Each structure stands twice: as C-alpha cells, then as structure tokens.
C-alpha cells in the first residue's frame, strides 16, 4: 500500500503550500519506505518539469533543505507526490517513485503479481509497467489500453492507482481499478484540483488551510481515464473518459461436494452480530426462538483461490457492474455474475449480451455454470 497525492492550479499560493505539506505529511501513513515528488512550472514563458527522490518518509522530507530548495519556484503549475510502502524490490532510493522513462514520470499505488512483458529487466513492478507503457505510447493518449491489457493477460493479479506526467503534452493522467482508491477535490469557483489516495487526507488538509468549504470531494471512477491539463482553465482543465478500460474477467463456479468441510455446525453464517472486534462472541438465545435450531445452509463458491459463502458473495458484489455500471447481482438468475480477482464483476444482463465475447466470455462455458445444492453439515 503506497500513497498518491497531487495538485494543479494557476499558481501555488501560501495556502496551497500548507495543503501540500499537510498531504505529504499524512501520506506517510500509507508508506514510510521513502518518497518522491514531481513538479511542473513555467519559467521565461517555457514549460519545465523536475523531480526528486528521498530515502526519508515524506513526513520527514518536508522539513529538509532539499524539499525547500525543490519547492523554490515562482510559477508552479502542478505537483505529484508518492509515499512508498515496499512490496516488490529493495528499500532503496533507486526504487522510489517517480520512475522516469523517455516521455513519462510515473507513480503507482498497488502491486502487480507475476511476470509480464520485460518485467524481469527491472527490480520493481512499477518501473517495469511505466517502461512498458512508454514503449507502447506513440502519442500521449495512446498505448494505455494496450499496456493494461498486456499486463492483465500475462500477470497473476494487478492492483493499481496510477498517476503520471507526460512531457510531450505537459499533462497528468490518472487511472485506477477497484483495488485501489483515489479521490479528487475540485474548487467550486476555480479550476484548482487536489487529489489523494484517501478522502480523509483531502478533508483534513483542506480544513487545516480553511479551504474545505470551497471544495467538492468525489472518488475517481474505476477504469476512467482522467486527463489533467495544467495549462487549461475551467471545465477544460480536467477531462474524464468513463469506462476507458474494462479488465478481463473470469466466472464464478460452484465449489462442489468438498464444501462440506467449510460449513459450521455451531452458528449461522448470516448472523454477524456475534462477531465483534474480530472475535466470535458467545451465542445468546434469542427471545421467542429455540437455541437448538440447525444452522442455515448456504451454497459456497470458489472465487480464484478463495472459498466464499453465498451471503458473503452478495456483500462483495454490492458494487457497480464493470460494464454497465448497474448494481444488479442475483445468484438466482440464469447465469452467475462474473468476477475478476480484483473483486470486480459483470452483471448477468451483460453476461448474456450480444457483445459478451468482447469482454472475454464464452456463452458455451457459461451454460455449464449451474447452481448446485450444498452438502448438509
């Protein structure tokens, strides 16, 4: 788990510096194995960019002479920050974000498990991803889908919130999947933007600078490509392309007769009141009910390498369909909904649609998926 923060606006005020330092301070909660930052600015009517890495956590870095020297620019247009929690690669400055390629300066919150194209050439998954993106990107807005498709196809799993600066068009781009969060705060009157991995970070930082009342905070939609142009004004500064990329999916299937060993004879899986603070509490007798009732039987499903009960499955799927955006999961309908390892799904209506195969499905395979009765405990 790493942390992303960012800003764009014409130009940085004293209040903005307070917000930036507060965000970078709190970002250490998401990673203390080093940090990095990117800045774009104008000087003599020309666009410039620079970046910096530090072995220190961001909460310590903001008090160093290096940070103050880095921030000593008059016409700052945008900022990006990253606090690293190492998951792949050694804890050293060379593995801190951003990663620079020919055209990009990129930061990543998440983990890519398994190998993908040229990943063995780099020590971290994030550096490998941005070099692959740069090699596929013949233009600033090209190659993003192809890169995500390639990594999804070859790797075991992929969790991401991505932000990168492209020096070819002087723009910043953001995209995430359901496995990582990202929130944007928009100023109500101007086109100034802040973003962070956690809503609470934005709320606290803006409130500390007495600016919270002037902003609206909303989540970045999953799979939407956000393009931020620091040189534009008004509604032209941020362009949102919803459902820019839909990841491949696999389907739910019933685990079968072996599920018997995963059933409990002592409590009801739907009864969550007996679980508090991560511990099971003594089962108390309900008024007007006998305590010797047998537990409710449920079907169990294998989802990736996990075994999930029907009730837990319904809770997990209380999110929009990755294709149509609707919440319409129903295990009793004609085909079970589809699930990607990042806990995303496609509803049954989309599963049965004419464009099904474009999302990686086969109707022939779905016809074999049926709901089976569970084994008695």
Image: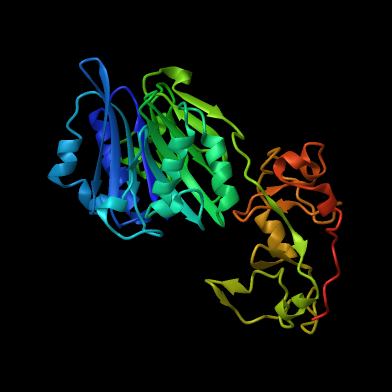
Which residue lies at the image location 85% right of the left edge and 51% below the top edge? 364
Q: Is residue 287 visible?
A: no
Residue 306: percent from left, percent from top: 64, 67
Q: Is residue 232 left or right of residue 254?
A: left
Q: Nearer the viewer, residue 373 or 21?
A: 373
Q: Is residue 183 above or below residue 111?
A: above
Quadrant (top left, top right, bottom left, bottom right) of the N terminus: bottom left
Q: Nearer the viewer, residue 54 or 135?
A: 135
Vertical placement of residue 365 versus 349, above or below: below
In the figure, is residue 191 to the left or right of 241?
A: left
Q: Name the residue rendered at 86%, 51% in the picture.
A: 334
Depth order, front residue of 125/76: 125
Looking at the rendered image, the quarter that the C terminus falls into is bottom right
Query: Which sits in the foreground, 112 or 191?
Result: 112
Q: State the image coordinates of residue 194 (x, y, percent, origin top left).
A: 39, 34
Q: Residue at x 71, y 42 (%)?
A: 359
Residue 320 in view in this figure: yes
Q: How many marks?
A: 0
* Residue 298 at x, y percent in the picture: 78, 69
Q: Residue furthest bottom?
A: 292
> Residue drawn at (59%, 53%), measured in percent from left and top?
342
Name the residue at the top extreme.
45
């Amino acid at each position: 788990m790493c942390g992303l923060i960012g800003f764009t606006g014409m130009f940085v005020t004293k209040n903005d510096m307070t917000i930036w330092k507060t965000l970078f301070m709190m970002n250490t909660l998401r990673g203390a194995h080093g940090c990095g930052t990117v800045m774009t600015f104008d000087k003599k009517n020309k666009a410039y960019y620079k970046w910096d890495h530090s072995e220190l956590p961001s909460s310590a870095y903001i008090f160093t002479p290096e940070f103050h020297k880095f921030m000593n620019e008059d016409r700052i247009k945008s900022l990006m920050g990253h606090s690293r929690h190492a998951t792949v690669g050694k804890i050293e400055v060379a593995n801190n974000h951003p990663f620079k390629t020919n055209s990009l300066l990129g930061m990543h919150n998440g983990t890519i498990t398994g190998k993908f194209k040229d990943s063995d050439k780099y020590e971290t998954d994030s550096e490998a991803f941005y070099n692959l993106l740069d090699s596929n990107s013949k233009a600033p807005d090209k190659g993003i889908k192809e890169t995500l498709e390639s990594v999804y196809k070859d790797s075991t799993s992929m969790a991401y919130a991505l932000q990168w600066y492209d020096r070819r068009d002087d723009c910043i781009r953001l995209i995430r999947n359901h496995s990582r969060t990202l929130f944007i705060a928009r100023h109500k009157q101007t086109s100034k933007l802040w973003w962070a991995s956690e809503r609470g970070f934005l709320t606290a930082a803006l409130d500390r600078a007495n600016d919270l009342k002037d902003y609206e905070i909303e989540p970045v939609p999953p799979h939407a490509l956000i393009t931020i142009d620091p040189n534009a004004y008004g509604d032209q500064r941020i362009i949102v392309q919803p459902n820019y990329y839909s990841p491949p999916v696999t389907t739910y299937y019933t685990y079968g007769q072996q599920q018997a060993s995963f059933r409990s004879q002592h409590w009801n899986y739907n009864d969550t009141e007996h679980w508090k603070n991560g511990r099971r509490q003594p089962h108390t007798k309900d008024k007007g009910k006998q305590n010797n009732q047998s537990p409710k039987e449920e079907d169990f499903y294998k989802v990736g390498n996990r075994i999930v009960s029907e009730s837990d499955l319904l809770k997990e799927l209380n999110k929009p369909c990755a294709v149509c955006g609707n919440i319409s999961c129903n295990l009793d309908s004609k085909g079970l909904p589809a699930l990607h390892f990042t806990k995303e799904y496609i509803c049954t209506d989309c599963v049965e649609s004419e464009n099904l195969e474009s999302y990686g499905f086969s109707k022939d395979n779905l016809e074999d998926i049926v709901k089976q009765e569970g084994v008695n405990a």
